[in-house]
Amino acid sequence: MMKQGQRMKIINKLALILLTFLKLCFPSNLIEVLDLKGTWKFCVGDDMAFAQLTCQDQDWDKIHVPDSWEDDGFPGYDGYCWYRFAFTFSEDWGTKNLVLLLGAVDDVDEVYFNNKLIGALGNFPPAYRSAYDEQRIYSVPEELLNIGKKNVIAVRVYDHGGPGGIIRGKEIGIYQTTDKKSFWSINLSGTWKFRPGNEKEWADEKYNDNHWDEIIIPGAWDDHGYADYDGFAWYRKDFVVENVEPQHLVLLAGKIDDFETIYINGSKVGSTMPVFQEGYPVEQNHEWQKQREYYIHRSRIHWGRKNTIAIQVYDGYEFGGIREGKIKLLTRDEYKLTQELDNYNFNEIIEMIFE
């Protein structure tokens, strides 16, 4: 039997952790720019032309957000659907530090702003992976805004079963964050530049990768046009850190099949790459199953301007690449808090408290 004092210590500790977590994830310094709750255009099916600004959606159905599409006239439907919302961006709204909050999407989504992918969570078939319980928080790049003109948010959704769509969320809209001390984790999932092969110059931040292919991560490269490819390949992506004071960061790079070396702005930050003999790795310790986490010294980041992350990957056989997991950059405080929450078995704690 747990003593009353022990119970209260656990309850107080959990309350402090959860309040801090909520403060980090949903800071109070958000200014609403545009409320997106309400009526959206909606179409069953899948066509990448639906992301385009010029897509003709006059005959599309209308649906309420947030809500499951089953509860809004599409009972029992599982599969692909698209949402679209058009609006005029006012000159008075401000263009800096904008984020799009979409709440929870069941199960998988890609979000396009004026035909440019700004974020994605989960994996579409054939490498299906649900992200139904994750909050969608996507940065809106200033260069994508059409000031005083038409803008379109297009959301591609796949539902595997049960409720589907943009199903819930108290804050759904475009927001601006103003407090430099707060930090929105940078979601790095989505579109990356990709090229099979292995050249040292591909780690250089000044290397021109405009001619490279594009690929969605997380997801095996075999499912994105490179079936049965084994060997070396590189991923590259640019990002900007604008709304946080200079500090040490943590990079979550997902689960990578099989080995990788990671560079930020041309500097190596970490690696699992083994020694090779006759073209094959000497040791394998099931690295493909492990979540990659790397400490990033603040001196490696260009604060307030473009940064480039380059990831060299080697795959020995079968599926390869940045296959699954969270791909994001976050502060050390956020990382430590996440780790502390993960260490708690909440079911066991509840049983102890009320035993």
Image (tube, rainbow, N blue to C red):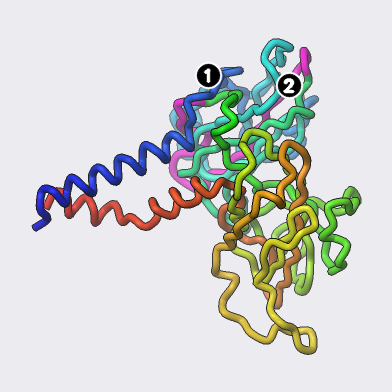
Can you see residue 174? no
From what the image shows, is residue 124 above or below residue 245?
A: below
**Residue 81 percent across, percent down from the top left:** 61, 37
State which quadrant residue 117 falls in: top right
Can you see residue 284? yes
**Badge 1 is on which residue?**
38
* Label 2 neighbour load within 10 Å: few <14, some 14-19, many 20+: some
**Badge 2 is on which residue?**
151
Give the tally of numbered discs. Answer: 2
Residue 140: mark in rendering: none
Residues at marks 2 and 1, CA–CA distance in whole angstroms: 17 Å
Magenta stretch containing residue 31, yes or no?
Answer: no
Q: Secondary structure at mark 1?
A: strand
Task: Identify which residue is drawn at 53% across, 19% down.
Answer: 38
**Residue 218 percent across, percent down from the top left:** 64, 55
From what the image shows, is residue 281 above or below residue 241?
A: below
Task: Look at the image and give the residue range highlighted in magenta.
Answer: 147-171
> What amino acid is found at the position of numbered circle 2 in the picture?
Asn
Looking at the picture, tell me which residue is in the foreground, 265 or 71. Answer: 265
> What amino acid is found at the position of numbered circle 1 in the picture?
Gly
Task: Identify which residue is drawn at 58% across, 42% down.
Answer: 185
Task: Identify which residue is drawn at 21% across, 50% down.
Answer: 350
